[in-house]
Every structure is written in structure tokens, then in C-alpha cells.
Image (cartoon, rainbow, N blue to C red):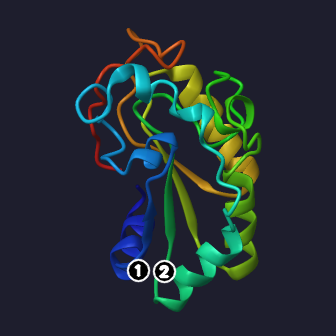
């Protein structure tokens, strides 16, 4: 992060972190519950049930602002490779693989812009193409992209839900 960005973040102090996806249907830890808390075969099919028809981005932003939050961060693509945006890197995303069939990040970005709420989208990916696509997509949506792990060019993101990407190596942003 730039010195100005880091200062802003330290001064803002309080924000909403949204960590959400198909495994939320199970109420378990979202990142590494595949095979540990949720059998792999079941985990890999949860996207077929993910249909957040009650999602209301404007309401989320209003709740965050009413609570005094200064920013919103959303994990837009997590370790399992599922994206909450219409990814061209993989069809394993909310717009192409779920009954919901729509992008979730664009409405959130629009609601944040409308209410003057800074928004950041975080991704954990070991795939350079997916990270570059994510950054471009987020910039077009008006959201600050952050790549939440180092890019490992020796590994690719999962080709399908049954594959697991390598464990990310966190970096200070």
C-alpha cells in the first residue's frame, strides 16, 4: 500500500469485511472447510444451491454506514477458486455456475459509490491470469482491487471445484 493509503486505512480503523460464498450455506469456516468440516463431494456441489435472491447491496452499505464503518472489503474470489463476479478465467463463478446467475460485485460497487463508501475487493489466487483479470474487472467496477496473496506462477487456479489451489502465502498490502 502507498503511505497515503496506509495512513487512510489506519485512520479509518473500522470497516465491514464480507467473507461469503457457496460454503456459507453450511455455516462453516469458508476457506478451508472442504474435506475437514464439509465432505469434499458435498462442498464441491454447494455452488448449485447458492442463490442469494435476498442480496441487497444498498442495504449492506447502509448497515455498514449506520454502524459507523468507514469502508467495505469483500473476498471476491477465495482459495477454493469460486468467484463472486463474472470471471472470464473460469466458469466457476456466481454468474455462470449458480442458480442466481448474476454478478454480486457490480451491485455492491455501485451501492458503495452511490453512498460514498470506499470499497475494496480482495482475492486469494495463485493464478497470474486470474489475478490480472480480477484487477482489471475491479478497476472497471470502480472498486480498489487487492491481491491477497503472492502470485505463484508454478501453479494454476483449480480447473474445476474438485481441484484445490496451493495454499496462499500472505503478503502485507
Quick check: 130 left or right of 172?
right
The residue at the point 42 percent across, 58 percent down is 2
Q: Horizontal and vertical percent for residue 79? A: 40, 32
Measured along the vertical axis of the image, is residue 37 above or below residue 153?
Answer: below
Q: Mark 1 points at which residue?
A: 12
- Estimate the spatial distance between the alpha carbons at disc 2 and disc 1, rounded to whole Å: 6 Å
Which quadrant of the figure contains the N terminus?
Answer: bottom left
The residue at the point 51 percent across, 68 percent down is 72
Q: Horizontal and vertical percent for residue 60? A: 60, 73
Q: Local crowd at mark 2 within 10 Å, few (<14), some, or many (≥20)?
A: some
Residue 9 in which image quadrant: bottom left
Q: Name the residue under label 2.
A: 70
The residue at the point 58 percent across, 71 percent down is 118
Q: Is mark 2 on a helix, strand or loop?
A: loop
- In the rendered image, the residue lying farthest to the left is 36
Q: Horizontal and vertical percent for residue 50? A: 60, 42
Identify which residue, 45 or 61, lies in the foreground. Answer: 45
The residue at the point 68 percent across, 35 percent down is 98
Asked if the residue at tag 1 contacts the one at tag 2, i.e. Cβ–Cβ closer than 8 Å, the answer is yes
Report the label total. 2
Measured along the vertical axis of the image, is residue 79 above or below residue 141?
Answer: above
Q: Earlier in the sequence, mark 2 or mark 1?
A: 1
Identify which residue, 98 or 111, lies in the foreground. Answer: 98
Residue 59 in which image quadrant: bottom right
What number is the disc on residue 37?
A: none
Quick check: 76 left or right of 113?
left
Q: Horizontal and vertical percent for residue 56? A: 69, 68
Measured along the vertical axis of the image, is residue 71 above or below residue 155?
Answer: below
Q: Local crowd at mark 1 within 10 Å, few (<14), some, or many (≥20)?
A: few
Q: What element carries label 1?
A: helix
Amino acid at each position: 500500500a502507498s503511505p497515503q493509503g496506509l495512513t487512510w486505512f489506519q485512520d479509518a480503523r473500522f470497516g465491514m469485511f464480507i467473507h461469503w460464498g457457496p460454503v456459507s450455506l453450511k455455516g462453516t469456516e469458508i476457506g478451508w472447510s472442504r474435506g475437514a468440516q464439509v465432505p469434499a463431494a458435498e462442498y464441491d456441489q454447494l455452488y448449485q444451491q447458492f442463490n442469494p435472491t435476498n442480496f441487497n447491496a444498498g442495504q449492506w452499505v447502509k448497515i455498514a454506514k449506520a454502524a459507523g464503518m468507514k469502508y467495505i472489503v469483500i473476498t471476491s474470489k477465495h482459495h477454493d477458486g469460486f468467484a463472486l463476479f463474472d470471471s472470464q478465467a473460469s466458469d466457476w463463478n456466481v454468474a455462470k455456475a449458480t442458480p442466481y446467475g448474476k454478478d454480486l460485485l457490480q451491485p455492491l460497487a455501485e451501492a458503495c459509490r452511490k453512498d460514498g463508501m470506499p470499497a475494496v475487493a480482495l482475492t486469494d489466487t495463485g493464478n497470474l491470469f486470474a489475478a490480472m483479470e480480477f484487477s482489471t474487472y475491479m478497476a472497471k467496477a470502480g472498486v480498489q482491487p487487492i491481491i491477497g496473496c503472492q502470485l505463484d506462477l508454478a501453479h494454476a487456479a483449480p480447473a474445476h471445484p474438485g481441484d484445490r489451489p496451493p495454499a496462499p502465502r500472505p503478503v502485507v498490502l
